[in-house]
Image (cartoon, rainbow, N blue to C red):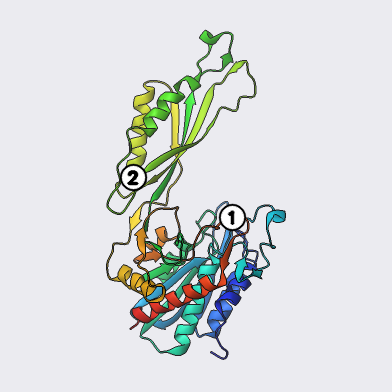
Amino acid sequence: MDRPPPRVAAIAQALIRRRSVTPDDDGALPYLAEILGRAGFACELVSFDAPGLPRIGNLFAKLGAGDPHFVFAGHTDVVPPGPLASWRHDPFAGAIEDGVLYGRGAVDMKGGLAASLAAALAFVAERPFKGAISFLVTGDEEGPAVNGTVKLLEWAKARGEVFDHCVLGEPTSGEKLGDIVKNGRRGSLTGRLTLHGRQGHVAYPHLADNPLRRIGRVCDALYAPALDSGTPHFDASNLEIVTVDVGNHATNVIPGEATLVFNVRFNDLWNAQTLSAELRGRVERALGGAGFTLAFEPSNADAFLTAPGAFTDLVANSIQDVMGIRPAFKTNGGTSDARFIKNHCPVIEFGPVGKTMHAIDERVPVAELETLERIYRRVLERYFA
């Protein structure tokens, strides 16, 4: 390197100042490629597209060769900021007030990404190591997640890249940095159930068939009995009905259709296929011969687990070295790109406290990012020891 590596706060600020709301990048990925390239990483910006979806940029950067091959993964895209007037600071200014960094992505996940970059840059600047360190960074995690990490991994595999372990810097900590590490995630399945009836006048119910009369039976069947009681590493699977709609704006019309949408967060007792079959069977038994249509959205989010072992111990020991606490390993929360990475190598997620992610005034203490950088650096030291 021809200059000292940038500090974590400076990297995070620079990323936040790129208005990279999915699918826009606003120069975030080229910025990362520039600073990694100065450190000797071979960087490639690659884009993918799909019918009906925007073209998305991604970054693959690698330093070193051979085994072991360690990967930091992340995303530069963020969700929209919401009403700007509600923010304490411009969500894309990267303002620091009283030691706290404000901005969209400060927590999810430009802060964690900045900490992994700062850690890697400091590590490679200080010592030689045997093996390789790579970065897999996408601009399509908060969106459809079609032209991002899943395709970048296949692109890298086609080039002969083999990854051994990965840390994804999503915001996993709960109350204090280092208290929670995610070594798995539940699956997600969304279903759309339409009950078919016959529209008519409320004064002549014998000429109509109100599908809303069957809503109660269907809800009871979806909710009970419980799908399961959980497994050693996962909570019980949970189904929630999120909306019921008939599109009826008149009070004297019996609707002809009623649609309800539900989402299930499921554990490793199920996959999308077996769970779909279970729920379809429940609906059929509840409705008997009544007409319905049940469609499930395509799911690329089955449950997965990175089993406790040497790699999870290494991460836990690194956290304990820096923080003096032993993290809990959990599998709750939403989905992430770890669901794609797990098909290529063991992956864990570990990053900042997530209380303000996706919120107005999303923010993270700079000291927390600096500590996270030290933990990531300790992970690298132990990994390449």
Three-letter residue code for mark 2: Ala
Residue 371, position as x, y percentages in the image: 48, 74
Question: Quarter of the image containing the C terminus?
Answer: bottom left
Q: Residue at x 38, y 33 (%)?
A: 223
Q: Secondary structure at mark 1?
A: loop
Q: Is residue 314 visible?
A: yes
Report the Cα–Cα distance between label 2 and label 1: 27 Å
- Residue 65, by quadrant, is bottom left
Choose the circle earlier in sequence order: 2 or 1.
2
Above-or-below relation of 201 to 90: above
Which residue is disc 2 drawn over? 236
Label 1 sits on residue:
359
At horizontal 69% and vertical 52% (from top left) the residue drawn is 83
Would you say residue 160 is visible in this rendering?
A: no
Tell me the residue at 43%/65% (across/down): 350
Percent across and percent down for residue 175 are 46, 60
Residue 369 as seen in the image, left or right of residue 225: right
Measured from the top left, where is residue 215 in percent x and y? 46, 25
